[in-house]
């Protein structure tokens, strides 16, 4: 820990990438863990345009189930520690693959949501936003008032492009970072998994915080095999007098 604090203390531009693991201690199942979301379902079956076109009812049942689950959980100390980092580093950017909104609830401000946000709805055809204050009935999926297209969750499905400006900014920030924290991600899903590699290529110190090793572990400068909700508050405590 001391070594990491000493290195981080001298860094000015910190980028954090989070995955489902940061929300695990809040009780949100991860994607690929043994109890993972995908355990019950296959990504190809549900988080894809093909699945939605073939069976919008099932896909909406799955998203409503996840929305209900997320509505009952709270941010954990890991989310709050990341929110505090904004005041510790001269330049701080949070990039998340998560769609659960817990970083925003934990008061992080500067967030790049790579994969959208499960609480938002949009039109399948024209992407017009659709009010998210009402539950979507899988039996009667509403239509877009503008073009009549079906309403879908505003998340990025497998095989779909990410928002070009968002992913471009994520790569720009990663290439300028002198410290990159990869937290709670299996580092499999692209293009997100290339961000820490880009940071490392641009001479950043790469710290991976994950209870398991990943394809990133071998290139990380530090690998912290601890739950993020336990490690991050200790890291922030150690950096507090940096400000
Ligand atoms: C794209 C939103 C261009 C939806 C998500 C073949 C066909 C089609 C596409 C591809 C293909 N081969 C490759 C691709 C590209 C594909 C991809 O990368 N596939 C992977 C599976 C190989 N990517 C895409 O399709 C992307 N678009 O590339 O467009 C294109 C177009 C056409 C064809 C090719 C390319 C879009 C990707 C976005 C998909 N949407 N989510 C929804 O949520 O419903 S991805 C989904 O996975 C979530 O966003 C999630 O965040 C993300 C990544 O998973 P992780 O966050 O890493 O979660 P995971 O469970 O895997 O890991 C959790 C980790 O936490 C574990 O390591 C665990 O050890 C750790 N952990 C657990 N507890 C803790 C902890 N760590 C610390 N503390 C703890 N307490
Ligand atoms: Zn529309």
Image (cartoon, rainbow, N blue to C red):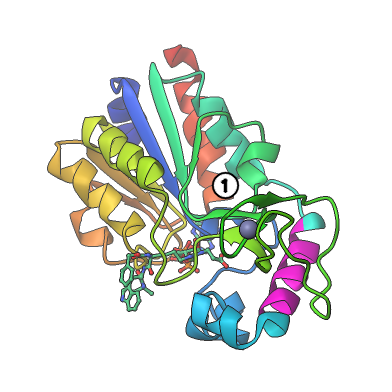
Residue in the foreground of this view, choosing between 89 and 114: 114
133 over 140 or under it: above or below = above
What quarter of the picture does the N terminus occupy? top left
Q: Residue at x 45, y 50 (%)?
A: 114
Residue in the foreground of this view, choosing between 97 and 83: 97
What is the x, y in percent for residue 121?
Answer: 68, 56
**Ligand number 1: quarter of image:** bottom left
Q: Is residue 65 magenta?
A: yes
Q: Residue at x 38, y 16 (%)?
A: 90
Residue in the foreground of this view, choosing between 177 and 123: 123
1 over 14 or under it: above or below = below
For the magenta stretch, what is the residue range?
59-70
Chief SS of the magenta region? helix
What is the x, y in percent for residue 240?
Answer: 50, 19
**Mark 1 surroundings: few (<14), some (14-19) or many (≥20) residues within 10 A:** some
Residue 40 as seen in the image, left or right of residue 194: right
Q: Which residue is mark 1?
A: 230
Q: Is mark 1 within 8 Å of ligand 1?
A: yes
Q: Residue at x 28, y 29 (%)?
A: 7
Quarter occupied by residue 154: bottom right
């Amino acid at each position: 820990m001391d070594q990491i604090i000493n290195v981080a203390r001298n860094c000015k531009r910190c980028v954090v990438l989070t995955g489902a693991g940061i929300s695990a201690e809040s009780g949100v199942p991860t994607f690929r863990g043994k109890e993972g979301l995908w355990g019950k379902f296959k990504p190809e079956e549900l988080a894809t345009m093909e699945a939605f076109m073939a069976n919008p009812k099932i896909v909406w049942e799955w998203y409503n189930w996840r929305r209900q689950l997320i509505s009952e959980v709270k941010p954990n100390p890991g989310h709050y520690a990341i929110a505090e980092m904004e005041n510790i580093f001269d330049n701080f950017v949070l990039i998340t693959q998560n769609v659960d909104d817990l970083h925003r609830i934990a008061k992080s401000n500067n967030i790049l949501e790579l994969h959208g946000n499960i609480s938002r709805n949009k039109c399948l055809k024209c992407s017009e936003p659709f009010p998210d204050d009402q539950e979507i009935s899988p039996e009667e999926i509403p239509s877009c008032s503008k073009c009549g297209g079906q309403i879908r969750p505003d998340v990025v499905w497998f095989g779909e492009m990410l928002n070009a400006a968002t992913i471009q900014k994520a790569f720009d920030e990663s290439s300028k970072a002198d410290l990159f924290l990869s937290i709670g991600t299996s580092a499999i899903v692209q293009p997100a998994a290339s961000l820490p590699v880009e940071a490392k290529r641009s001479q950043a110190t790469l710290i991976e915080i994950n209870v398991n090793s990943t394809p990133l572990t071998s290139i990380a400068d530090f690998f912290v095999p601890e739950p993020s909700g336990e490690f991050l508050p200790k890291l922030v405590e150690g950096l507090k007098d940096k400000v």
